[in-house]
Image: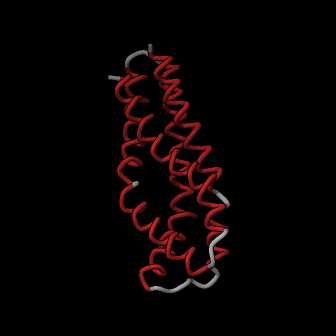
C-alpha cells in the first residue's frame, strides 16, 4: 500500500511541478514580451482554467503524501516516512505561498480578462507572481524527489 500511495503522491506532484516549471521557463518570458492587454487576457484565461482544474492533482498530492507518511511510519519504515513527511511539508509550504501570493493575483487577472479590462499595475502584478514561480517549482521538484526516495527506502 505504501508504494501505491508514494506513486500517486509522486504523479500528482509531478503535474504541479511540470506546470510550475513551464511557467518559470516558458510562460514568464513569453508574457514579458506581450503588451499589457494581451498579457492580461492570456494570463487571465490560463489562470481561469488552472484554478478550475489544478486543485484535483494538488489535493490528491497532499492527501496521498500524508497517507504515505502515516503508512510508512505505522509499517516500520521510518526513513521512508521521513522522506514522505518532508515531501508533505514541502507541498504545504508551496500551498501557503500559492494561497498568499499567486492565488490573489490569479483572481485579479481572471476578473480583468472576463471584464475585458487591464488591471491597474498589471505588469507589476505579473512580476510579483513571477517572483515566486522558481521557488514554487523548486518546492514541487523537491517534493517529487522525496516521494521517489520514499519508494526506494520502503523497498
Q: Quadrant of the C terminus?
A: top left
Residue drawn where x is 57% and y is 39% of the image: 141
- Along the viewing direction, whichever of 36 and 71 lies nearer the viewer: 36
- Along the viewing direction, whichever of 148 and 117 lies nearer the viewer: 117
| Total numbered labels | 0
> In this image, 69 relative to 43: left or right?
left
66 w.r.t. 110: above or below: above
List the single residue furthest toward the top.
155
Whole-percent x and y of residue 140? 55, 43
Q: Give the color scheme: rainbow, by chain, secondary structure or one colour.
A: secondary structure
Residue drawn where x is 49% and y is 30% of the image: 147
Q: Quadrant of the N terminus?
A: top left
Residue 53 picture quarter? bottom left
Whole-percent x and y of residue 149? 53, 24
Whole-percent x and y of residue 115? 43, 85
Whole-percent x and y of residue 51? 41, 62
- Along the viewing direction, whichever of 88 and 26 lies nearer the viewer: 26
Residue drawn where x is 34% and y is 26% of the image: 4
List the single residue furthest toward the left.
1
> In this image, 135 relative to 76: left or right?
right
Residue drawn where x is 55% and y is 50% of the image: 94
Amino acid at each position: 500500500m505504501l508504494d501505491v500511495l508514494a506513486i500517486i503522491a509522486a504523479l500528482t506532484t509531478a503535474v504541479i511541478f511540470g506546470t510550475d516549471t513551464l511557467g518559470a521557463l516558458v510562460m514568464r518570458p513569453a508574457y514579458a514580451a506581450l503588451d499589457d492587454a494581451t498579457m492580461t487576457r492570456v494570463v487571465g484565461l490560463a489562470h481561469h482554467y488552472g484554478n478550475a482544474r489544478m486543485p484535483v492533482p494538488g489535493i490528491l498530492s497532499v492527501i496521498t503524501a500524508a497517507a504515505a507518511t502515516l503508512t510508512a511510519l505505522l509499517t516500520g519504515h521510518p526513513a521512508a516516512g521521513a522522506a514522505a513527511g518532508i515531501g508533505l511539508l514541502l507541498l504545504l509550504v508551496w500551498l501557503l505561498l500559492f494561497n498568499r501570493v499567486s492565488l490573489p493575483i490569479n483572481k485579479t487577472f481572471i476578473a480583468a480578462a472576463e471584464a475585458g479590462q487591464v488591471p491597474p499595475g498589471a505588469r507589476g502584478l505579473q512580476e510579483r507572481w513571477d517572483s515566486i514561480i522558481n521557488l514554487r517549482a523548486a518546492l514541487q521538484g523537491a517534493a517529487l524527489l522525496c516521494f521517489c526516495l520514499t519508494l526506494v527506502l520502503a523497498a
